[in-house]
Amino acid sequence: MILSSQKVAGVSQTFCDLRFEKLPLDQHWDMAGISVQTGAVRPAFELARALRSRGIKVVLGGPYVSIFPDQCRDHADALVIGEADDIWRDVQEDLLAGALKPEYRVATFPDLSIERVVEKSALDIKSYFTTNVVQNTRGCPFSCDFCNVHVMNGHRLRHRSIPAVLREVETFLKEDKRIFFFLDDTINADEEYAEQLFRQLEPFRIKWVGQATTALGEKPRLLEAFARSGCGALLIGIESLNDGSNHAHKKFHNPAARSGGVHQVYPSGRDLRLRQLHLRPRRRHP
């Protein structure tokens, strides 16, 4: 939704969710943008090849492209590397001018304090469990080697302004009154910010889910703010209860002794989902 909300005069954008929609290959577009996840590299490349064979320019972006651009150059007319908030408009303008560049790369991480209005006009709202997906922060201060967040979004936590988040929630509710998913990788990473935000969300009377760490169990004030603002479920990742295993993968912020914190989260009335990630020896990417 973030990129489709960036509109350029003379460019019409259509969104196709290949998880449940068939791509209408009988239609022609001047350009197709494909976001590539690691687990879907092969079908993404196959789709890019099919589109290019029809004379459609292909732009590839997303996590895999941003981390492994050299693996992707032969499969696209252009690559978008990194967070595209500030460069997707450039791609559209260059397409109009017939001057598409082979690579678009962000010079710095986008400043999230700059308000960017997000629209849902590209989505078929009824096709989704919810379209109320909101991201308050990006980045992660940790360096777990099985995760790409700190690689993609940096180690410094960047924040949207709380008034901007409140306006977005209010706007989204006009189109979809279902549950909200706060997309932050760790909703409790900045405890002061999170408490301020969710206390101010109380009047909206929403229900929401998010992702947190076991440290949340040690923060009763923040737990209370989550509960009062409508938190219905939290996803908490516990990769191992063995500190040696965690440390081997550069995860130091979730010691085994802290795992008991989940017992503080559960009695607070939150539904709890524990994510288990099986860690294996590091292997070089082919």
Image (cartoon, rainbow, N blue to C red):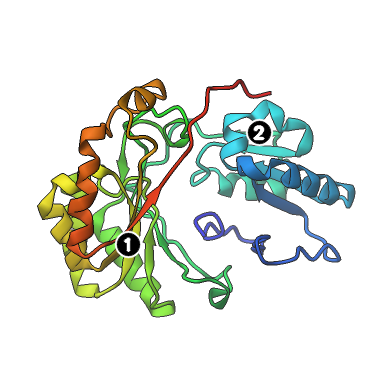
Q: Is residue 40 left or right of residue 247?
A: right
Residue under label 2: 103
Q: Residue at x 74, y 52 (%)?
A: 31
Report the disc number at residue 97.
Answer: none
Q: Position of residue 51 (x, y in %)?
A: 82, 51
Amino acid type assigned to the residue bearing label 2 in the image? Glu
Against 1, is 141 above or below? above
- Name the spot of residue 281 as percent of width and height, x first: 53, 23
The three-letter amino acid code for the residue at tag 1 is Ala
Mark 1, mark 2: which one is toward the viewer? 1
Of all residues, the one furthest to the front in this rendering is 242
Q: Number of marks in the image? A: 2
Are the residues at dot 1 and dot 2 in contact (C-beta closer than 8 Å)?
no
Q: Which residue is mark 1?
A: 233
Mark before the other along the chain sequence, 1 or 2:
2
Residue 5: image location, x then y, percent: 52, 60
